Image (cartoon, grey):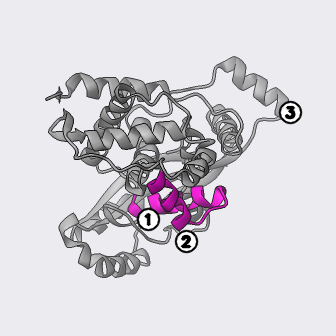
Amino acid sequence: MIGARKTVTTMIAGAAFAMLAAFASPEAGSAFAASEVRVVVNGTAITSGDVAKRQAFLRLQHQNADAKAAEEQLIDQTLKQQEIARVRMSVSTDDVNASFARFAAGNKLTTDQMTQILDRAGVGVDHFKAFIAVQMSWPRLVNARYGANNRMSNADLVSRMMENKQKPETTEYILQQMIFVVPASKKGIVGQRKSEAEASRSKYPGCDQARVFAATMRDVSVRDLGRVLAPELPAEWKPLVEQAKGNTTATRVTDRGVEYIAICSQRQVSDDQAAEMVFRQEDLDKAKAGKNAPPENPNAKKYLDELRNKAQIMRP
């Protein structure tokens, strides 16, 4: 779900200009020496090559690029990746590729040109896409665990409503997610599972009977998403939900399998929570336009600190 957070574009604002400079500089992407393990996080190794790539990435963002800073960032990223994998809430490869393409287009570059620039700068496209995947997936885990608790103060909310002259209205959805599971070892059956998911949409009996319905099919799981306001819809699902004909969306292939969203109900609401979500989305849109980014959800740090406290982090 969408929460108060820095977008991928905001996180690397201004990096493209440094990337262009790096592209013109032949020494920017010097070859790395043979990698050695620098840190092991719950059994996952972070090598000197990984650290060098992150240092190069930090330089593109005009941030502190010493080895210690890069190492700490990679430890945090690894912990997030492990937790994302554990709860199976990663965005799909297609989502990451689409975000990468949008970032390139936003900087008037093709994806091939962006890839060349990242390689020349010593970052590499895989390193950058891994960063994008975590930036897209992590806020969902935080919101799923804690809810949207980074609330506006009553004073701020009232002030914004006074500016607008009236309380804004938005759409409230009650949603359910149908997942036709595709194991990682059986990606060859995606086409078959997609056909099964598409066929099931016309027979979908409604949210109350969804679990009984799912039990009649092979490897189908149901997730109750509950109340979701329009501004909270994840970017990859938003157009499908808004353009849905009937009570189900079109299908999407994700890392979990083939999925679609069932719309249990929808209505227009104008309560305080809806108003806050509308205002938050306005702030996020301003951030995407290059204005100030909204504050990061404080629960993100709380969650990460908990993962760090439980982790086995060893430096050989």
**Side (left or right) of 246 relative to 312:** right
Residue ID for mark 1: 94
The rendered magenta stretch, by its main secondary structure, is classed as: helix
Could you classify mark 2 by the number of other residues whose Cα lies within 10 Å: few (under 14), some (14-19), or many (20 or more)?
Answer: few
Amino acid carrying mark 3 in the image? Lys
Does any portion of residue 32 appear in the rendered image?
Answer: yes
Q: Which residues are magenta?
A: 92-120
Q: Is residue 118 magenta?
A: yes
Between the C-alphas of marks 3 and 2, the distance is 35 Å
Choose between 231 and 203: the one closer to the eye.
231
Q: Quadrant of residue 103?
A: bottom right
Residue ID for mark 3: 165
How many badges with numbers are in the image? 3
Could you classify mark 3 by the number of other residues whose Cα lies within 10 Å: few (under 14), some (14-19), or many (20 or more)?
Answer: few
Residue ID for mark 2: 246
Q: Quadrant of residue 141?
A: top left
